[in-house]
Amino acid sequence: MMAEDEKKKVVLDKSDFSNWYNDVVEVAGLCDKRYPVKGMNVWTPYGWKVMQYIDSIIRRECDSTGHGEVNFPLLIPKTEFQKEADHIKGFDSEVYWVTHGGLNELDVPLLLRPTSETAMYPIFSLWVRSHNDLPLKTYQIVNTFRYETKMTRAFIRVREIHFFEAHTCHDSFEDAERQIREDCTIMDRVARDLCIPYMLVRRPDWDKFAGAAYTIGVDTLMPSKRTLQLGSIHQYKENFSRPYDIKYEGADGEFHYCHQTTYGMSERLVGAVVGIHGDDKGIILPPKLAPIQFVIIPILAKGKIDVVRRASEELLEELKGYGFRAHLDDRDDRPGSKHYDWEIKGVPVRIEIGPRDIENKTLVLARRDLSSKRTVQRVNLKKECASILDEIEQELRKRAGDILDEGIRSVDSLDDGIALLREWDGIIRTHWCGETDCAEEMEKGLDRTFLGFPLEDYRTGELQKEPGNCMFCGRPTDTIVYLSRSY
Ligand SMILES: [Zn+2]
């Protein structure tokens, strides 16, 4: 963390998104980037609390859909890691190795999990015996490690990643498909609480997860007009159950390989919240993630100090009693300076309380998202506070949703696409015939990469289809693709 006086010198200008982002994560007190390993940051108490609230939303969703939380070891033997060929190829260049235990070289080197398929599946093969054991639905929230070679960025591209991963086993492809629909529903509810818009985009084959039959990416659009993958959902079919021997005895008395799925999300969710909602004054936290939802700032007037203090403490206790996360800022500092600090940290509502408010039995609630103020009757505190948090959520969702809607444009020909991109930046939606040559030409011409095929409806998994012509070769096709620049 920066020293207080250093923080106050930082000028936040979101029109320069990259620098704004790098500064705001630190001045808002979310992380400390001074740890002496590249791509590994320290979670500070405030930032870790935000992450913990996100984790608890994910836990709520997984627990209520019958997933069991597990916690597997961090180290994976090289011998297990090597069992699925595509998976190794996909992760080989990114893994950290442990080769020594004390002074002894290990017989079998161990790796730090980049993801936990190869840790879990040898054990799943022991857990799954009969069709009665299925579906097996598990998840864990742990740290994973990937040796990123691209430029690192707090929460968005790091080498130690706070990671959620769900792993499931099923008795059929159809049941695994049902799981993927459920994962999409979970994503929808998580995104709702984070007030973040997202797209479900099936990745092209060349960009699917190492070992997957297919991958659905969960993407959002950052203010820099680059897409950010927030999560991914994978259908494995039998690709892992065969090498890891995860079999069950069916009702027919025969052994069958399981169909498997995974669903992953990470601390990038924090990055998206910061990037999408924040402004030149700092971050703005959606109420469900805010460690402090209401901050009380006493306005201490001469002769009324004790009265104001007592009223502030009573207000704090009352808010806590209603289940709100409230904080009383009784530091010996000017109200204006306190105001500034809480603005940077994105606290949704500020309540300044002075002698006049006490006399009038009113309170002034100031919203961080709109910089607007509202006077409410003290007696209606609970109702007013609940509704203001609700309104803030709606406003954040609407604003963020508008940015995404405005960030996607349909284009028919490559020339039109190139012309459009001279004056506008965002996601290009167009047709593609399925030929990789055309894909390459489109990517080159637009200076974007294939994000993939947008889903029409997450409840069915159907892709968007529309009659048209391939952007490059003009052949008729109904396949819709998105192209973007991404993180
Ligand atoms: Zn084509």
Image (spheres, rainbow, N blue to C red):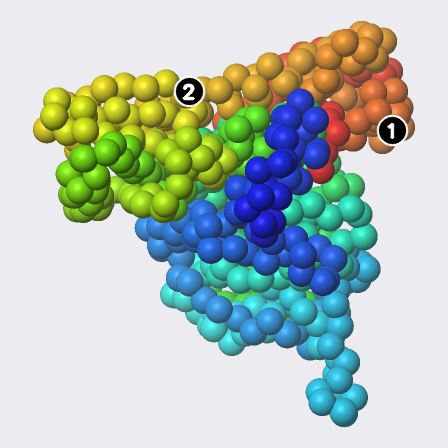
The answer to which of marks 1 and 2 sits earlier in the sequence is 2
Which residue is the extreme one toward the front?
A: 303
Q: Position of residue 407 (x, y in %)?
A: 63, 18
Is 276 rendered above or below residue 244? above
Q: Is mark 1 on a helix, strand or loop?
A: helix
Residue 370 image label: 2
Q: Position of residue 218 (x, y in %)?
A: 58, 37
Residue 116 can be seen in this image: yes
**Residue ID at (38%, 28%):** 393
- Which residue bears the numbered disc 1? 440
Q: Quadrant of residue 147?
A: bottom right
Q: In this view, does 466 lie above or below 82?
A: above
Question: Mark 1: few, some, or many residues within 10 Å (few <14, many ≥20)?
Answer: some
Point 71% across, 87% down: residue = 101
Lateral position of residue 208 relative to residue 388, left or right: right
Dot 2: element: loop
Q: Judge whether residue 86 can be spotted in this image.
A: no
Q: How crowded is mark 2: few (under 14 residues within 10 Å), some or many (20 or more)?
A: few
Amino acid tagged 1: Glu
Three-letter amino acid code at disc 2? Leu
